[in-house]
Amino acid sequence: MAEFEPVLLANIHKDDSHTLRAYESFGGYAGLKKVLGSMSANDVKELVKGSGLRGRGGAGFPTGLKWTFLPKDHPGPIYFCLNADESEPGTFNNRILMEEDPHQVIEGLIISCFATAASTAYFYMRYEYPLAWKRVQAAVDECYAAGYLGKNILGSGYSLDIFLHRGAAAYICGEETGLIESLEGRRAWPRIKPPFPAVEGAFRKPTVVNNVETAACVKQIVDRGADWFRSIGVQPDPNNPRDPGSFGPKLYCLSGHVEKPGCYEAPLGITVNELIDNYGGGVWKGRKAKAAIPGGISMGLLTADEFDCPLDFAGPGKHGCLGLGTAAVVVVDETVPMVDFLHNSCQFFAHESCGQCTPCREGTSWALKMMNRIKGGKGRLKDLDLLLEIGDNIGIIPGTTICGLADGAAWPMKNAIRKFRGEFEEYIKRTNPDGYMETHPVPVLEIIGAH
Amino acid sequence: MATVLVDGQEVELAAGERLNGIQAAARVGADVPHYCWHPGLTVVASCRMCLVETGRRDPATGEITMLPKLVPGCQTPATDGTVFVTKSEKITAARAMVEEDLLIRHPIDCPICDKAGECSLQDYHFEHGREERRADLKPFTSRRRELGDTVTLFVDRCVMCTRCVRFSREISGDAELMVVNRGAHEEIDVFPGFPLDNKMSGNVVDLCPVGALGDRDFLYKQRVWFMKSHDNVCAGCSTGCSIKVEENQDKVYRLKPRENPHVNQWWMCDEGRYGWKHVHDPSRVTLPRRVGKDGFENVEWSTLSGELDAKLSASKRIAAVLSPHLTVEEAYQLAKYVRGIDEQALLVLGPIPTEGQDETFPNGFTIRAEKCPNRRGVEEVIVGLAKALVTWDDFLGRLSDEAFDAVWVTGGYKSNWHDESVAQKLSSVPLLIVQDSFASPLWDAATYQLPSATFAERDGSYVNHADRLQSFKWAVRPPAGVTTEGQLYWRLLKSPGLYNSRAVLDELTRELLYFSAAAGGNGDCGIDLKSNRLA
Ligand SMILES: Cc1cc2nc3c(=O)[nH]c(=O)nc-3n(C[C@H](O)[C@H](O)[C@H](O)COP(=O)(O)O)c2cc1C
Ligand code: SF4
Ligand code: SF4
Ligand code: SF4
Ligand code: FES
């Protein structure tokens, strides 16, 4: 496969790429000038709609369509929240954009706000991103000084303020309504929907929430056109009328057991194998891969046999995964016990469950306690069934929770146990030869000091 | 008109009626278990106990399309064509899951838990839970801490429904309660130095579906299944909250609010809730006495009414002070009785105790400054019979130039309601009958001392500040030696048999126009007496 010429990451290695001076020298803010000079908000909306851009935050929702959910002719204010909370394990594409090319994000954000008639944007940034914070704040300051932000931008009559908001350091702050609650100063407890944020979001006003990479794509679409965007990626499946296709370049975060981990830009639809071989330099130390997370840990697990899975919005789902998610691929080599993998995953979700919904709060906590015990050599075959039962029953898909965190917790359980059941059983029998057949409750062992 | 289909049965919604799945199901008698939802609080749909199946019925074809996933009944509105299914394998499994989840870390200390017997977790577990415990956890931590002077938190019994938190934010408004920590480490708590301390705090105990919030006043005093519950009306202020008096063997253990959309919704204030202690106060007066040759001597009730009747009949000028703590039936009977002897008998409205200002909470609940239940009712009895209202102060003023042969004073106040000077003003009255529950200067100055009943012992009706009349029956018998006002007046009026407050009210509705709307029963929530005036 021919090496793809990066667009979103085109400038990140250039000197002072994070500064306005450098950004303008690469042609930055020309798109904004074009938009403000010659396009209406509706033109931009239509352009983005026509590009087929789908949100990069995890759910892959068509961006232009989301914008049209805002109430028509609303007297305002309409708010725009840029979701930079990036805390899906394995994911760091937003971070690279914010640290190395913050102006690209801000330009995309200004254009998105113009398109949605938002006059205030909240840039909600993950707490643990100090450099990104510094660079984005500096970039915003530069923009105010240069007239790209503030009152009457570039004489267009359009005004916009961006407030950088430091996140509350929890995974759930990235869920769009958790983000809004957190922004308003409360616990990031996701809201029940409806109303959706587009109708009633931040401060009870219509609100758009988009991801950082989504904003960057908007800027590229304005520069290069919808046709360019649609020329990259995967066309809709003709057999599935509801598939809107997967267009555009995507930032894949490749990590785990590969020779060259990193954030790579490739057309949507690249396979796991291609990503590992063409970008990652192969599995590290010449070992064999055993599995990979297709798009953040929430999405589940692909076995090495499934690495021909195309990483577009529809691909991972065909292999029983939840979806493309954040396109963060974490490779697991043959030396890693799946018990360890699942234990780690359970630990994450039990720690991050916001605790509102009974099935998520208790399900993730119970799952972790079981994994603690299994890992500690007191597992029972029955535990695998219990874990699967939890996995099959928590989440917005079965309808038992408010937000998708629980689905994300469920998928690694379901995929790991269903795809590697033999390995789990072997581990349990080997480490608990006397008790693996037991079916009655046993007292928990706090063998691993999991929180 | 909107039609909703619940478990195959059609439910018609009235115009503008907004029900959720739980409420719609209740219309066909289907009970959807729930923890977090409460009709008086915002919907959070987080406990997931109320999961049901839903879909839509096509109005044209009648074809039903169901959603593949479960939905919370509390969050799903019933609109025209909505279909709800509350019984299915999927729902049964979901309820079993939530019950199992909630019991994983629960201490299951029902034997020592105050809520046992009225606990949703217990009840739902028996109905929807699994028969065996599958969780591999020892849940045996049972921590408790005080949230404030009124409420204790049993931390590990909490099911995180957040009703208490929402109450403190949405209803009482002080927002003292909060959730701390995350996930399974979550707990209810207060901020250090800011305890649960508001005038409605006790309501969180009623709201708590489990035994996590304990009422410190009630804690460990009584198992709930031993108590009987009696509908009553709070006598604490002129709001007149609908309440329940809960007692065992004539001892009151607690008061609880009773739902009344016209008055108090689901709530009551702490002052009312804990304001029943005088009922069992050992210093209550319980023996009728009269002044004899050597001071006070006991009288038998059996001879007392004849004796009073004889003495009053011999009096020319009579005044009766009608306390705003009397029920309208009692006030009317006494007024009717004295006016039967002296046609011009002066009817006086007893003192109206007030304290501070009316206090309104964010949702509109108001604690009134007027600390008596029935000013309006007694006022209207007086105006209806005497055409003029004489207040207590008017009366005291008139005493200097008007002589009375007999004065009958009713009290029933919880605390001191007059001072020595009042007793002095009345001391020259030849026949001074004082009916009260506690000794006082007037009591000591009386020629007849008649122990009176408290609210929990009375039968009758109060009229609240907004002209709503609510009737109730006694919850406990008065202490030995006390005859209730209603019973004594009934006897004085020579009515047959035992005091029947309904019969008195019926008479009142015929005699006095103001009360006419109460004719023929007035329901659990009482009746708005203004409704007739508008007509
Ligand atoms: C538990 C959870 C965490 C999430 N975290 C993030 C995040 O960190 N960043 C993000 O952009 N979207 C996150 N999302 C997705 C957002 O809810 C939302 O779909 C997204 O921000 C929309 O942006 P997009 O349309 O540009 O994709 C998360 C969702 C869930 C359920
Ligand atoms: S699913 Fe989990 S994380 Fe999401 S709202 Fe419910 S408890 Fe919170
Ligand atoms: S809260 Fe309910 S289930 Fe828990 S101990 Fe009390 S009575 Fe038992
Ligand atoms: S203390 Fe009671 S009311 Fe409050 S959240 Fe817990 S269970 Fe609900
Ligand atoms: S009652 Fe509906 S989710 Fe709690």
Image (spheres, coloured by chain):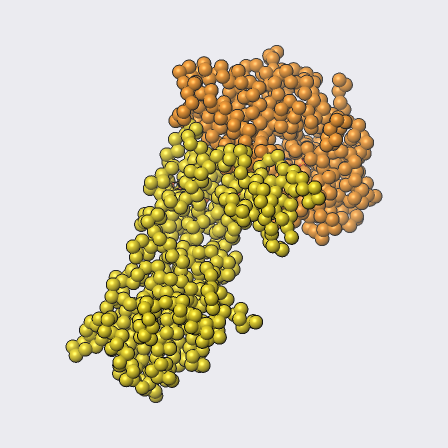
Chain colours: A orange, B yellow
Residue under the point 31% across and 80% down:
B407
Residue with the most extreme bottom position = B401
User: How many numbered dots are placed on residues in this image?
Assistant: 0
Q: Nearer the viewer, residue B243 or B55?
A: B55
On screen, residue A299 above or below B468? above
On screen, residue A162 above or below A228? below
Question: Where residue B45 appears, x then y in whole percent?
Answer: 54, 43
Q: Classify the position of the C terminus of chain B by image quarter.
A: bottom right
Quarter of the image where one finds residue A263:
top right
Q: Is residue B503 visible?
A: yes
Q: Nearer the viewer, residue A210 or A255?
A: A210
Q: Nearer the viewer, residue B140 or B115?
A: B115
Quarter of the image where one finds residue B419:
bottom left
Q: Is residue A256 left or right of residue B427?
A: right
Residue under the point 28% across and 84% down:
B314
- The picture quadrant for ligand 3 comes to top left
Q: Which of B305 and A109 is in front in this view?
A: B305
Residue with the most extreme left position = B294
Residue under the point 60% across and 40% down:
B54
Residue under the point 62% across and 55% down:
B16
Question: Where residue A113 appears, x then y in whole percent?
Answer: 72, 43
Question: Where residue A28 appears, x then y in whole percent?
Answer: 77, 36
Question: Where residue A415 appears, x then y in whole percent?
Answer: 58, 23
Q: Is residue B77 left or right of residue B237?
A: right
On screen, residue A37 above or below B273? above
